[in-house]
Image (cartoon, rainbow, N blue to C red):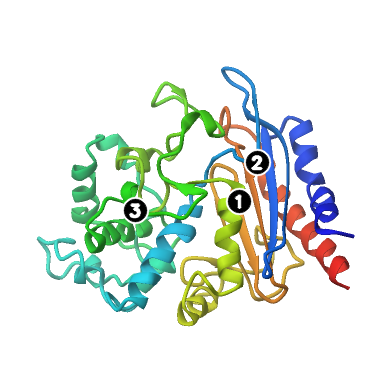
Amino acid sequence: MTLDELIVQAFEPARNSVEGGAIPGAVLGVVTKDGARAVHLAGSAQIEPTREMLTRQTWFDLASLTKVIFTTTAILRLVEAGRIALDDPLVKVIPDLRQYDMNATEQRLTFRQCLSHNTHLPAVEPLYTYGQDPQTLRAFILQRVWQPSPPVYSDNNFMMLGIAIERMTGKPLIEQPLAPGLTFTPDPQQCAATEKCTWRGRVIRGEVHDENAYAFGGASGHAGLFGTVDGVLDFARSLLDGSGLSPSSLAAIRERQSEKRTIGWEGCYDGWSGGDSCSASTIGHTGFTGTGLWVDFERGIAWSLLTNRVHPSRHKDSGIIPLRRETGDKVIALFDALVR
């Protein structure tokens, strides 16, 4: 079996989902530590208002993959540069965080806590309903009194981190430099469409699906990044071969901060999105629009499944959760057979 043959067989669950109408389109890519890769795809980049087919060059709204591909990586590179330490409080670079209450819990939040979702901040807050002025919304999230609650996976953690990156670099996120195949400002005509948004009154294509990121100016620490399958695979390979981060940063994204989480990423656990067959050294992350990336360091392979499952509506059962798991199990089983 070759890698090209592997990808065709591993793509079968996604093909069935496309042909059954559960999702409009899907692209599956795999890459190995030594740089071998294969990609397979099927379906449509858009079905409303007109149908357009996917290509290998189609840009996907990566949604929460922004958290790991961009934000976590950017923070760790700032750590590598000596600008901050993971256990520094955010107020080191955002001194106006809860500036009217010196005893506020938010003033003690650290980069490590936000990266590992170990804070009291809520999972999500509809900030866009308070208006669309990006600077006012940034001020709002920094001054809001967030009520105490147990730690949860939180967009707000990464919105805070995005603000910190802007403060340290002096550039809005939407102007940050990115590798080829990744962007905050794609050509809409080259993008997979997402939702027919009731708030914006149109099919979203080439602008971020997430309402809060849109209101923040198009990019935030939790969402806004677009990528092609090859752009995502290039990033994954940089983790596998060690070229993308320092050894200490690579250790950080692999080391458990809690039962399920590392710095930025999820670590493999029973029932997770990557399936049951990957090694214990596997990390991964998913995005609400239907995207995902998983990196198995022990085997030296990574795979990305990109779909536009929210097009034309999120309010349907796309079957994305079992699709991701079945795809991951097939990738690993076939790869193990390939290298035997």
Dot label at residue 156: none
Q: Residue at x 28, y 70 (%)?
A: 109
The answer to whether the residues at label 1 and label 3 have Cβ atoms under 8 Å apart is no
Looking at this view, is 328 or 339 the one in front? 339
Dot label at residue 56: 2
Q: Quadrant of the N terminus?
A: bottom right
The x, y position of residue 171, in whole percent, is: 25, 53
Looking at this view, is 34 or 125 the one in front? 34
Q: Is residue 15 left or right of residue 209?
A: right
- Between the residue at mark 1 and the residue at mark 3, the CA separation in whole angstroms equals 20 Å
Dot label at residue 230: 1
Choose top left, top right, bottom left or bottom right for residue 111: bottom left
The x, y position of residue 156, in whole percent, is: 35, 55
The answer to whether the residues at label 1 and label 2 have Cβ atoms under 8 Å apart is yes
- Between the residue at mark 1 and the residue at mark 2, the CA separation in whole angstroms equals 8 Å
Q: Which amino acid lies under the numbered mark 3 shown in the image of this protein? A: Gln
Number of residues whose C-alpha sits closer than 10 Å to that of mark 2, classed few (under 14), some (14–19) or many (20 or more): some
- Between the residue at mark 3 and the residue at mark 2, the CA separation in whole angstroms equals 24 Å
**What secondary structure is marked by label 1?**
helix
